[in-house]
Image: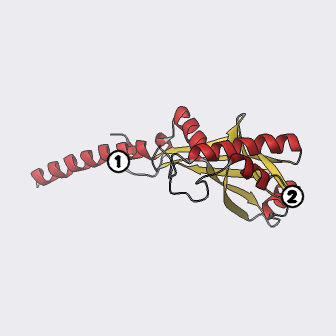
Amino acid sequence: MSEQATNYDDVKQYRLDPEREEELVKTGGECTFIWANKAGHPLGVTTAYVPAKGKIWMTATKERVRIKAIARDGRSSIVITSKGTPMGGGKTVTYKGHTVIHDDQETKHWMYRLLADGMQASQREDEGNEFTAGLDPEMFIRFLDTPERIVLEFTPEMSIPFDGDKMAAGTAQAYAEFARQDAEAREQS
């Protein structure tokens, strides 16, 4: 048993594999988007997103404080969790990156369509969600398509992936070894 397997001080061995990270990004649907205010204090909000072209795409209205903050400084972060996905809980990925604001109709309509289609598809896995129940993609896009709405394009630059399934397996192995050591100690005393 390695030294790392005897405690949770170093969890690097529990990284989410790239394929699982991709699955998480594709199925997550919501992320926590984090930015810094004028004083440098980090703030975040949980929001819907669409993964496309290696980026994370979100939308908001221009008056949101996060939009003003990103206009000043695009440095930002995103956290995605597997809670509520077919993957089960315990998998996360945090991305450090930069966000760009888009206000052109072509980008907005492209992203709105992806978001609406994704939300409609998610109805099958999230039957109790009143927000997406009976969602009409065309009507949803009409609600989004206002002059005040913009699109955020987040480009990941670094990731911190975590796989709780790997940690659980490592923990079980460590518990078995601890039990063996404890039994040996009792026999010797």
Taking depth in this image into account, of 104 and 123 the one nearest to the observer is 123
Give the numbered dot on residue 148.
Answer: 2
Identify the residue at horizontal 72%, vertical 33% (top origin).
Answer: 53
Image spot of residue 161 (x, y percent)? 56, 43
Q: Secondary structure at mark 1?
A: helix
Give the numbered dot on residue 171.
Answer: 1
Is any part of residue 155 visible from this angle? no
Taking depth in this image into account, of 70 and 25 the one nearest to the observer is 25
Q: Amino acid at mark 2?
A: Glu
Identify the residue at horizontal 71%, vertical 63% (top origin).
Answer: 43
Name the quarter where the C terminus is drawn: bottom left
Image spot of residue 39 (x, y percent)? 80, 67
Of the numbered discs 1 and 2, the one sitting upstream in the chain is 2
Q: Relative to 37, is 79 on the left or the right?
A: left
Image spot of residue 89 (x, y percent)? 46, 50
Q: Relative to 174, is 139 on the left or the right?
A: right
Q: Identify whether 30 is placed above or below 65.
A: above
